Structure formats: C-alpha cells, structure tokens
Image (cartoon, rainbow, N blue to C red):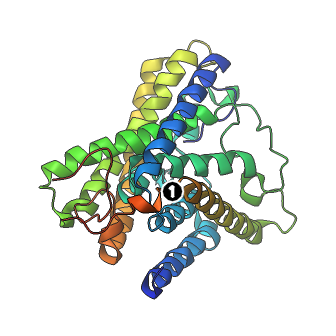
C-alpha cells in the first residue's frame, strides 16, 4: 500500500474502533425491531437461551467482571480485532490471482 | 434483527443453513475472481466497521431501537458477493463470540442479512442507481435509498421463515407481517443515512475502490456498469 492508502486505512480503523469502543457506550438498550415485534406479537417466549450465554464476551461483555462501560469497550475492541483478522484472513486466502490484477480500464 | 434459537423450527433452520452454506460457496467463487490484493484491505476494514456499526442501537420508537445491517453498505463498497462474506463473517463472530444470534439460527440470519440484505439489496441499488442516471455523484444517495429498502426486505425474510417454521402456536402471520414491515421501514431510515454517509466518504477518498461506482478501477465479474 502507498503511504496515502495506509493512512486512509489507519483512519478508517481508528473511526471503527471509536464506534465500537466509545460510541457503543451510548447505544440504546431498548429491544431492536425483531425483539420488539416478538414481544408485541407474543412469540418472544419461544426464544431459547443462547448456547454460549456463559461465554466471557456474551452479550457484549455483560459477563465480564469489570462491568458497565469498560466491558462494552473491551467487547467492542475484541470484536473489531476479530472481524478485521477473520476478514483479512479469508479475503487474503481467496484473493484473485495477481496475474488478473487489473490496471485502470478505459 | 438477529434471530435467537427456538423461534424457527429445526427443519426451516436447517434448510436456511444449507442455503447459507451454498451462498457462502458461491460468494467465495465469485469474489475470488475480482477481489485482488489491493481490494483486500478495504474489504477487511468494511467487515470491522459493520461489526462496530451493528453494536450501535439507535432509538426508533419509545421502547424500540434499531441497528445497522450493513448489507448494502458492504455490497456497494466491495461487491455483492464479497459483501455477502463481510456480513457472514460478522454474523459468525457475533454468534460464537458474543452469543448474539442463535447458533442453529445462523443460517436464517445469514439468509436474511447477507443474502437478502446484501445481495438482493445490491440488486435494488443497481435499479435505483440506473434511475438516478448512473453518475458517480449519485452512488452514495442510491446506496442510501437501497439500504433503506433492504431493511424491511430482510425483515420480511424473517416473516417468510416464521410462516414456514415458526414454533409459536396460533399467531396471526398477517399481524406479524404488518408489525415487521412497519417497524423495519422506520429502522431502514437509519440504515439509509448511515450507508449514505459512509459510502459518500469512501467515494470522496477512494472512488477507484468502490465496486458499485462507474469509477471502480477493477474488474466486475457479474456485470459491467455502463
């Protein structure tokens, strides 16, 4: 990557981390659309507990001892790293062969 | 928008799992034709951003919130099939790391958000973009409009699955249809604005990397914008 591309990538990543770690503190805890409809229409009770409900990061950090804002921030940061890592891995693995690498087309 | 386990029966959940797995295979084979190494960093960044964006529930009605799906956002930026993989990766991480979205419901959630929200949403984008004159300065607004439409579409995916395999007894599908459509039209407004701003920002910085734009410098395999 060129220096400008690297800079833009870093900026995008910084914004992403800000959203996951800081902005997530202000997220609404009200039920989302599907949960709302499930309660309103009377099928919310068919939902089972998640198999991994006791996992350390379940519900974005609610099980963490630190509690509250720090837990949400930790969960957000770990999620961003995991998503970035998994995506880099998969997309790098399946990337198009370099010989097919296109130049600017007319 | 994430379906938990138990709401949809095992048959329909398994069928959706097969569709999702098939979609994953198609997505890999399509994406690998055009996703060159210079497009990989953006695709990875979009994945991380969609994860972050989905954490932000914004208030929609008293007692109800909504959050980004990111299907159209990802599809316009990196193409519909790489976009499918973006959303699928996010959903897999959410289900296995954060207990968000049931494990047996993973296929249902991939069908609704990656396939309908992303791939079908990209089809909506192509139609809107054509009506908007196919100009680079209309990419962001077309993406925003398609994103708005994609949310109720994904919601109706759930209604269809519920009609086929919902485990709750004696409920009115018509009422659930109306409730899902109404609430998700409202949530779609947020999806539309977020998509508009993010796609607009990338169009300003790197229009050559935006798959859904005529300024895209790579090869599109599925179709060529005129």
Left or right: residue B215 compared with residue B183: left
Q: Quadrant of residue B218?
A: bottom left
State the residue at coordinates (73%, 46%).
Answer: B96
Look at the image and tell me in which quarter the N terminus of chain B lies.
Answer: top right
Residue A27: name its quadrant: bottom right
The disc numbered 1 marks a residue on which chain? A
- Residue B16 placement (x, y as % from top left): 56, 26
- Give the residue number, with chain letter if any, for mark 1: A95
Q: Residue at the far bottom: name it.
A: A3
CA neighbours of label 1 inside 10 A, class few (<14), some (14 to 19), many (20+): many
Q: Residue at x 45, y 36 (%)?
A: B155
**Relative depth, front residue between B106 and B26:** B26
Q: Residue at x 52, y 23 (%)?
A: B161
Where is B25 relative to B148, above or below? above
Farthest-out residue, right: A65
* Residue B220 appears in the rendering: yes
In the depicted structure, whether residue B57 falls above or below residue A68:
above
Residue A51, relative to residue B144: is it above or below? above
Could one spot residue B184 in this view of the protein? no
Res B137 quadrant in image: bottom left
Question: In the rendered view, would you say A88 is above or below B182?
Answer: below
**B215 or A100, nearer to the observer:** A100
Q: Secondary structure at mark 1?
A: loop
> Residue B30, position in %: x, y?
43, 44
Nearer to us in this view, A88 or B188: A88
Give percent across and percent down for residue B57: 55, 57
Residue A24, horizontal then vertical, whole percent: 61, 66
Q: Which residue appears farthest toward the top when viewing the image?
A: B170
Position of B169 with respect to B179 (left or right) is: right
Counting labels gives 1
């Amino acid at each position: 990557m060129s220096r400008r591309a690297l800079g833009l990538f870093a900026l995008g990543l910084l914004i992403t981390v800000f959203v996951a770690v800081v902005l997530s503190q202000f997220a609404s805890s009200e039920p989302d659309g599907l949960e709302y409809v499930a309660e309103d229409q009377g099928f919310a009770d068919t939902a089972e507990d998640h198999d991994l409900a006791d996992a350390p990061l379940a519900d974005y950090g609610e099980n963490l001892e630190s509690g509250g804002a720090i837990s949400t921030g930790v969960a957000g940061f770990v999620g961003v790293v995991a998503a970035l890592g998994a995506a880099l891995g998969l997309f790098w693995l399946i990337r198009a062969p370099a010989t097919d690498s296109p130049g600017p087309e007319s | 928008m994430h379906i938990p386990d138990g709401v949809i029966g095992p048959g329909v959940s398994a069928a959706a799992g097969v569709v999702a797995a098939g979609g994953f295979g198609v997505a890999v084979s399509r994406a690998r034709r055009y996703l060159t190494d210079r497009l990989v960093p953006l695709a990875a960044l979009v994945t991380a951003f969609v994860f972050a964006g989905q954490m932000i529930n914004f208030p929609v009605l008293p007692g109800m919130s909504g959050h980004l799906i990111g299907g159209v956002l990802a599809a316009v930026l990196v193409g519909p099939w790489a976009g499918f993989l973006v959303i699928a990766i996010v959903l897999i991480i959410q289900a296995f790391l954060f207990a968000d979205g049931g494990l047996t419901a993973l296929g249902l959630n991939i069908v609704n958000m990656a396939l309908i929200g992303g791939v079908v949403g990209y089809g909506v984008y192509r139609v809107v973009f054509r009506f908007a004159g196919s100009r680079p300065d209309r990419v962001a607004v077309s993406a925003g409009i398609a994103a708005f439409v994609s949310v109720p579409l994904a919601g109706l995916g759930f209604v269809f699955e519920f009609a086929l395999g919902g485990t709750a007894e004696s409920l009115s599908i018509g009422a659930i249809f109306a409730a899902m459509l109404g609430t998700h039209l409202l949530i779609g407004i947020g999806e539309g604005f977020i998509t508009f701003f993010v796609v607009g920002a990338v169009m300003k910085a790197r229009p050559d990397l935006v798959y859904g734009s005529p300024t895209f410098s790579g090869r599109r395999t599925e179709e060529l914008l005129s």
